[in-house]
Amino acid sequence: MEGRSSAALLTVLFFGIALLYLPILVLIGYSFNASPLVNVWGGFSLAWYGRLLHNRQLLEGALLSLEVALAASTGAVVLGTLAAVALVRFARFPGRLLLTGMVNAPLVMPEIITGITQLLLFVSMVQLLSWPHRGFTTIVLSHITFCTAYVTITVQSRLQQADRSLEEAAMDLGASPARAFLEITLPIIAPAIISSWLLCFTLSLDDLVISSFVAGPGASTLPMVIYSKVKLGVSPDINALASLIVCAVGACILGAGYLMLRSDRRRALEAQAALTGRS
Amino acid sequence: MKSTWRPGRWLIILPPLLFLLVFFLIPFAFAFKISFAEAAPRVPPFTDVISFTRDHHLQLSVSLGNYRYLLTDEVYAMAYLYSLRTAFFSTLICLLLGYPMAYAIARSPRSRQGLLLLIIMLPFWTSFLLRVYALEGIIRDNGFLNTALLHLGLIHHPLRIMRTSLAVYLGIIYSYLPFMVLPLFATLEKLDPTLLEAAADLGSTPRRAFLDVTLPLSLPGVIAGSMLVFIPAVGEFVIPSLLGGPNQLMIGRVLWDEFFGNHDWPVASAVAIAFLLLLVGPIAIYQYYSVRQLDT
């Protein structure tokens, strides 16, 4: 599909990219504004960044969110990988259709419905079992639920591409199925596992709706704190916080993207070298 | 089947199966049950649907009042229609904007495609909530857009965009545009350029070739991208809540208000169940069959 693009096409592309980036860039600009008023430029200042360090509510929310994201993405990676292995490797087992449905459904389920149904489950469980207490545990459990779906989809497609004969060769040479999986297949699907862990981590860190339902009165994740602040209007602290988060995430993604692009390019060069007989 | 039976398999199958059963599927049963309860001033705030009398008889007290309420109070029907309409038109605009973007990326040199895709996807990785908030900074009455236009003398009074449907549309388009571009790019990239050359050799104008060759072949991408935008847009809560006004009632917001504002858990459950049956169910069935069609 490579070829020349008309000027009109390129204009739309750059308009679209500008639309995606303008709000973020303006927000970063606002975060250095000494004046708390958005339409008045009061000079350059880092004061709002300094104030963040003294905002206990935000810091506690950030800490809780990081703990939740760490636990939820790790749990989801374990369950999602198991589900992917089950769906790809076991052609028939009772409950296969059920598992397929439950893996795919969270992707089309509006968060608000997942949130309310899970809260009702937790409330009923407390009545019957007096567990779990609403807070960290319930947030992690519900984040694992929706994150597992993303892991399964990602790992599943990688596993389908993986060459089964390598694993069979290992078993022919005397490795047990478990050992063959751990030493041959796991390294092959590792990139998918790592990228889905990162995806889950950001999804969990970002979730507002489901957390708001299941968190209960005591616990507030960072998005919940941010939402309650911005609901009241523009807040210079949040401008500073948002700029920090956007820059940190942007740097990570650009770094990861650069590494991926570079390895792609190297692979392409090597393939070319092999084809032309030069090294 | 006997030869493939290995009990070790269940160590792999059972953990995700049981977890999703308990924390994803069974919650719907509870929501279904509670949608037949009545709100009550207690903890948790609803009456028992299933209970045992003192002489250990099972007692069912089912109230259809919540569903009757959904049908009689027109707020719910209006919110449902408004959600559908908003999601439909913002998906359409995303498509009209995203298609040329994906096309331009697919036609750019391969060495630049990766970078362009990265630029498109980067906002998706940053916080959704913060991006909606950032958009508010642009479209507020005293925000960036109005300040700039007033300075340039193009307008004399600030444009009122916040708390209107336009703000909700902008929010959805801004947030979900990357989801449209990505699947469109994936199908356009795979398109065989010799087909277009063949069409040109046979006398097609570029416009004709686009309509007869490119567009039909990119239809799977159009459908996939539209679904990725439409589905989250229909149930959207954050965008109408932060950017919309009291008239921009989307179903997600109604549910939220019923739950956190009115503390009416049974009505909120009934809204969720109705939403599920009227919208999510059909979409899920459609997706299931379209995926199966692609597989065969």
Image (spheres, rainbow, N blue to C red):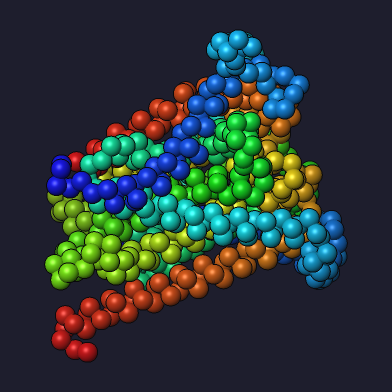
Q: Position of residue A90 (x, y in %)?
A: 24, 48
Name the foreground residue: A214 vs A253.
Answer: A214
Name the foreground residue: B264 vs B20.
Answer: B20
Residue ranking furthest to the front: B55
Indicate left or right for A134 with B224 as reference.
Answer: right
> Who's the residue at 46% across and 23% down the image?
B277
- Identify whether A134 is placed above or below B120: above
Q: Position of residue B86 (x, y in %)?
A: 55, 33
Give the quadrant of the C terminus of chain B: top left
Numbered disc total: 0
Name the foreground residue: B127 vs A43.
Answer: B127
- Identify whether B258 is placed above or below A256: above
Name the foreground residue: B26 vs B191.
Answer: B26
Q: Does residue A33 appear in this view?
A: no
Q: Quadrant of residue A127?
A: top right
> Who's the residue at 34% across and 40% down the image?
A100
> Who's the residue at 15% across and 42% down the image?
B1
Indicate left or right for A104 with A29 as reference.
Answer: left
Q: Position of residue A99 (x, y in %)?
A: 35, 40
Indicate left or right for A191 with B252 as reference.
Answer: left
Q: Position of residue B175 (x, y in %)?
A: 56, 48
- Identify whether A239 is placed above or below A111: below
> Who's the residue at 42% across and 28% down the image?
B281
Q: Does residue A60 appear in this view?
A: yes
Indicate left or right for A261 with B196 as reference.
Answer: right
Residue ranking furthest to the bottom: A279
